[in-house]
Image (cartoon, rainbow, N blue to C red):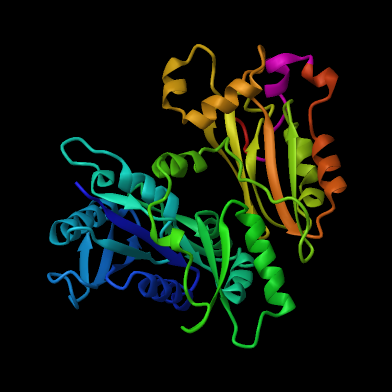
């Protein structure tokens, strides 16, 4: 049975999201557009609003529909209804910013008992994210205000505006930046350089703000993505998988990767944060803290806000259940980094910012590692070190 095609689109402003949808419709005039917004309501199920337009007779010019419930279930039902109505539909799923794209897609594609998997009915096209550089730069500096972000788990998590902006960029397979009519300024070029560093694996495309010459999107954006897209979404959410970094500097934007194979001293790390975070716009990675030797501690910052939290447990050689549950990429990395005593434990963080002092970042973090004497005290000695970052386990 031939499948439909699902394009997922989001953007950091309604205007740039609409721009990407318009360009997709020029490339695929018969596509069905389903615009989705999710209004989170504390611990209760959110209100999911959908507005569908396009070539499907049953849904053409239908009024906006609202339903309270699990957004994954509601969107799955909508997509299957469109699939039943059209032979090979191309659906453009336009998501509002309060949706965390990758967790949504993982849940949407997850097979459920008694229900056919969405992947049996649709292939996925590359995920497209429109980025207005002006809004993005402003959002990345906004850490004083929290907004609810729905991640597919059934509830919303309070998240800084800066974190939402960074996650949107990192979810993309292609980043679409509008080109001003008067040409690209140096400031806009700097913002584009920062965006490209935050997601080095994505294609960065500049499109006119209106139609005309040069308005056509590359053909691969309206074709099925390579097989295994759902596994790649899941892998990118693993706490021990760090994002690809871009080498070299452009417009003053740099990325620095720091790695180490011994535990970090929590007190010295806390003291070093001022030097480490100076000039950092975004950082992601994971830590091996001496105070929590069994925990994968995720490190994530956007703007001036840094979040450390226990995200997982390190794989142990005898824990077959955890090995089976891990993604193939994590199992491969664990095998590469495996140490007979430490297992897969390690530190790895990617920092991106403007004119970063690589030597300062590396020195500050290296000095926070346990010394040889501290390391020789073993787990009992490591866990006895006070932890001002996460507190006592």
Task: Find residue 7 and report its image quarter.
Answer: bottom left
Please provide the residue range marked out in magenta. 376-389
Residue 344 in view, yes or no: no
At 29% from the left edge and 68% from the top edge, which residue is drawn?
Answer: 31
* 57 left or right, relative to 144: left
Q: Residue 88: image x %, image y %?
A: 22, 58
Task: Find residue 5 and report its image quarter.
Answer: bottom left
Residue 146 in view, yes or no: yes
* 37 left or right, relative to 231: left
At 80% from the left edge and 35% from the top edge, which residue is drawn?
Answer: 368
Q: Residue 242: image x %, image y %?
A: 61, 41
Q: Residue 159: image x %, image y %?
A: 51, 57
- Which residue is nearer to you in this view: 319 or 308? 319
- Which residue is nearer to you in this view: 113 or 200? 200
- 338 to 187, vertically: above or below: above
- Which residue is nearer to you in this view: 141 or 216? 216
- 292 to 62, vertically: above or below: above
At 21% from the left edge and 67% from the top edge, which residue is drawn?
Answer: 66
Question: Which quadrant: the C terminus?
Answer: top right
- 68 to 388, vertically: above or below: below
Can residue 377 be found in the magenta stretch?
yes
């Amino acid at each position: 049975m031939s499948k439909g095609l699902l394009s997922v689109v989001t953007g950091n402003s309604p205007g740039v999201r609409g721009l990407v949808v318009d360009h997709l419709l020029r490339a695929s005039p018969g596509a069905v557009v389903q615009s989705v917004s999710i209004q989170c309501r504390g611990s209760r199920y959110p209100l999911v609003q959908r507005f569908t337009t396009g070539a499907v007779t049953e849904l053409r010019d239908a009024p906006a529909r609202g339903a309270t419930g699990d957004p994954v279930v509601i969107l799955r039902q909508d997509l299957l209804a469109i699939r039943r109505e059209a032979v090979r539909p191309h659906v453009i799923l336009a998501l509002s910013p309060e949706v965390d794209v990758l967790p949504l897609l993982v849940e949407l594609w997850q097979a459920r008992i008694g229900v056919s998997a969405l992947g049996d009915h649709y292939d996925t096209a590359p995920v497209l994210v429109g980025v207005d550089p002006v809004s993005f730069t402003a959002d990345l500096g906004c850490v004083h205000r929290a907004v609810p972000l729905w991640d597919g788990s059934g509830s919303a998590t309070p998240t800084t505006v800066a974190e939402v902006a960074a996650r949107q960029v990192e979810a993309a397979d292609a980043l679409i930046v509008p080109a001003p009519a008067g040409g690209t300024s140096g400031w806009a070029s700097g913002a584009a350089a920062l965006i490209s560093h935050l997601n080095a694996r994505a294609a960065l495309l500049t499109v006119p703000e209106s139609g005309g010459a040069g308005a056509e999107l590359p053909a691969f954006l309206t074709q099925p993505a390579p097989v295994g897209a759902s596994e790649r979404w899941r892998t990118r959410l693993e706490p021990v998988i760090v994002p690809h970094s871009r080498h070299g500097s452009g417009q003053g934007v740099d990325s620095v990767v720091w790695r180490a194979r011994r535990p970090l001293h929590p007190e010295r790390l806390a003291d070093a944060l001022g030097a480490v975070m100076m000039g950092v716009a975004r950082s992601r990675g994971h830590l091996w803290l001496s105070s929590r030797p069994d925990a994968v501690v995720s490190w994530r910052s956007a703007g001036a806000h840094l979040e450390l939290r226990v995200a997982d447990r390190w794989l142990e050689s005898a824990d077959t259940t955890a090995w089976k549950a891990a993604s193939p990429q994590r199992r491969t990395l664990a095998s590469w980094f495996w140490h007979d005593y430490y297992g897969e434990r390690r530190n790895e963080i990617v920092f991106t910012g403007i004119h970063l002092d690589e030597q300062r970042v590396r020195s500050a973090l290296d000095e926070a590692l346990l010394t040889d004497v501290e390391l020789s005290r073993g787990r009992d000695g490591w866990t006895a070190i006070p932890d001002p970052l996460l507190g006592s386990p």
